[in-house]
Amino acid sequence: MDRLLKAALVAALAVSGTAWAKVGADKAAALGDKLTPVGAEKAGNADGSIPAWSGGLTTAPPCFKGAGSRYCDPFPDDKPQFTITSANLEQYKGNLTPGQLALFAKYGDTYKMPVYQTRRTFANPQFVYDATAKNAVSAELGGNGEALTGAITGIPFPIPGNGHEVIWNHKVRFRDTGVRRWNNQFAVTTAGAYNLVKIQEDAYFVYSTPGIKPEELNNKILYFLQLTTEPPRLAGTILLVHETMDQVKEPRGAWQYNPGQRRLRRAPNIAYDNPGTASDGLRTNDQLDMFNGAMDRYEWKLLGKKEMYVPANSYRLHSDQLKYKDIIKKGHLAQEYTRYEKRRVWVVDSFVKKGVSHLYKRRTFYVDEDSWQIVAVDVYDQRDQLWRVQEGHHVIAYDKPYQLPALETVYDLQSARYLVMAANNEDAETATRSFTVGDFDPTNVSKLATK
């Protein structure tokens, strides 16, 4: 293990109790120096396969048509440096997750991973960097990791000391302040057939508002409204979520509207391992956005950092020149449209606590160091067998800038089925929207539902 991995492990082992401390000003001074403004190692790796971070991608390429248009590929001439297949797998297995190895074992004749030049494109606005520097010396966790205090707008723990902190960084990372997107979903059969479920989502990331103070949040970090528009049997279904900052003080608020009942009802089951919306049982509620919600059913262990081949800069997969039928194939995605790069990722292991239950006994998360985005998850069943594999493919919204989901997958190794989420190739691009808290008030949502 290298020096950084050892340091992370020592810090993790030193953690105990219900609160964790911020870092001192001396450590925080590394931000923007040896570390990027959000906490990644600025330098490249020893062999140069991971370059140094030089500010990220903040200039739109010539193919970009302006705000609201498709995020096109800024690297159209890039070709794979090599492609990992079952034939050469042994050469690269040290930099692959157990889940990726399992996909090769199951779909060896067709599964592949094209690996491209690593381009460290991640960037955020300056106000996020400024807030992150302040958070580094003020943010704390309480309530056994379920309460975030002293943090606002930026990454709360750019120099993490435990698994809770890494996952909180993912949960509150900057994703614009308000957006409308299409989170289309496809439950794929063993034969490769699927039905499209069209889902429009509005999200108000109030935590990320420039200049806002923690006491102005009313304990809410985001507001989320999901409207299913197709197929007809699901059209008009609404999900409303108020996500909290201190989940001990106030658990997530959730409401659901069913057109058949014509009433917005409280929905406390929109959490944990209850089945996700229209997912045909292929994901749980807390697998949306790779992971979301409360962490209290698991013990979390920070294992350190590792170099791995993970999805990155997935502009080709995000192209509006592709139809959904071009991407979604039998067994797995059309992997020729994917892009993998060697990245440093934080590895966080989680195990269900004694005395509580969850469909998944263990999950291992791989979190990109540049963006704090979870890019892969290995999911284990009650027999300690690898059950499901998640991957998150993303692009940089270079005019904002922030990292935007292009497509997420949940592969079920036991049923040979898989779920695709967050695809919008045949629909409008994710766009900035201005929201108020009132837009997500249950009373106003009820009026929307009954129009």
Image (spheres, grey):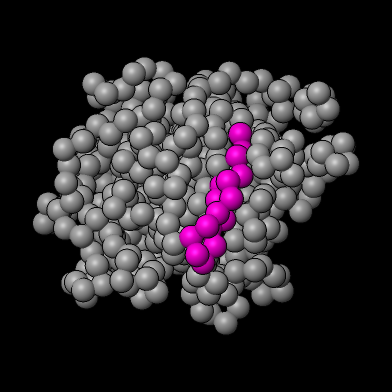
Quarter holding the N terminus is bottom left
Q: Which residues are magenta?
A: 185-200
- Residue 443 appears left or right of 384: right
User: Which secondary structure class fits the magenta region best?
Assistant: strand
In the image as oriented, which residue stretches furthest toward the bottom?
383
Spot occupied by residue 276 in the image (x, y as percentages of width and height): 65, 53
Query: Can the viewer see residue 425 in this picture?
Result: yes
Residue drawn at 40 percent across, 49 percent down:
327
Q: Is residue 249 magenta?
A: no
Q: Quadrant of residue 95?
A: bottom left
Spot occupied by residue 195 in the image (x, y as percentages of width and height): 59, 50
* Picture layout, residue 209 above or below residue 286: above
Residue drawn at 44 percent across, 47 percent down:
325
* Picture layout, residue 423 above or below residue 285: above
Q: Which of the two residues, 218 or 260, is positioned nearer the viewer here? A: 260
Residue drawn at 58 percent across, 46 percent down:
196
Q: Which of the two residues, 98 or 13, is positioned nearer the viewer here? A: 98
* Picture layout, residue 352 above or below residue 369: below
